Image (spheres, grey):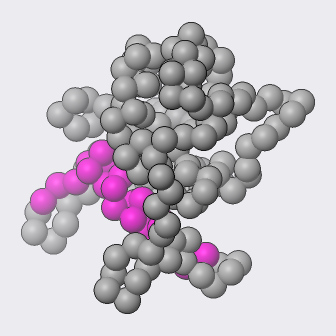
Amino acid sequence: MDWVTALPVDGEKRYNAYLAIVDSYRKNPISLPSHRYEKDMDNALLIWNRAISHTGLLKSIISNIEPKFTSALWTNLPTLLGTKLSFSTADHLKTDELEKIMIQTLEEILRSVFTCGPELKDSHGFAYDWCTLLSELEVASKTSIHPSTGNLLQSWREDGTPNFQLIL
């Protein structure tokens, strides 16, 4: 997980950043609009309420974020959930470069869409802001064909529903 910051203030809650999370098992991005410097409890609740529904309970968390962000809350929350918390360090990097590249790519796409201004308008005059387009950006990345393999990042059934194994 990593922060994408320095975005224009957006949405009715006036978000200025989003927390980008990549589910390493399914290689799915999850983008959560937020305020960069919210309290740790607010960010943990954001992750609990929005990300866990995509990933299920986590077996481990690898965080690229500075130790300030991963405060006492982050050491207590995984204990309550029975999750192991691992920090990546410069000496012993455990993060996958694919997740880092995926987050950077999503950030570049989002920033390129809004280079002309803070809103994007469709042919009917409806205005979109970056908060509204995060879900579409996730779907686009999940349904695009990976250039090196020629396969989708997530497989789909013929009826258009996702084909993935639910692990309980």
Residue placed most toward the observer, 130 or 166? 166
At x 19% / y 66%, what residue is drawn? 122
Relative side of 154 to 151, left or right: left
Q: Position of residue 152 (x, y in %)?
A: 54, 77
Q: Position of residue 37 (x, y in %)?
A: 44, 18
Image quarter of residue 93 = top right
At x 68% / y 80%, what residue is drawn? 149
Residue placed most toward the observer, 76 or 111? 76
Residue 120 vs 35, above or below: the answer is: below
Relative side of 12 to 43, left or right: left
Q: Which residue sits furthest right?
A: 91
Residue placed most toward the observer, 162 or 30? 162
Image quarter of residue 162 = bottom left
Image quarter of residue 94 = top right
Q: Which residue sits furthest bottom?
A: 158
Q: Position of residue 44 (x, y in %)?
A: 43, 25
Residue 160 vs 46, above or below: the answer is: below
Q: Which residue sits furthest left?
A: 124
Residue 102 vs 41, above or below: the answer is: below
Asked if the magenta segment contains residue 139, the reply would be: yes
At x 61% / y 57%, what residue is drawn? 25
Secondary structure mainly formed by the magenta segment: helix
Residue 56 vs 165, above or below: the answer is: above
Range of residues picked out in magenta: 126-146
Asked if the magenta segment contains residue 34, the reply would be: no
Residue placed most toward the observer, 88 or 66? 88
Q: Is residue 159 visible?
A: yes
User: Quadrant of the image for the N terminus?
Assistant: top right
At x 43% / y 79%, what residue is drawn? 156
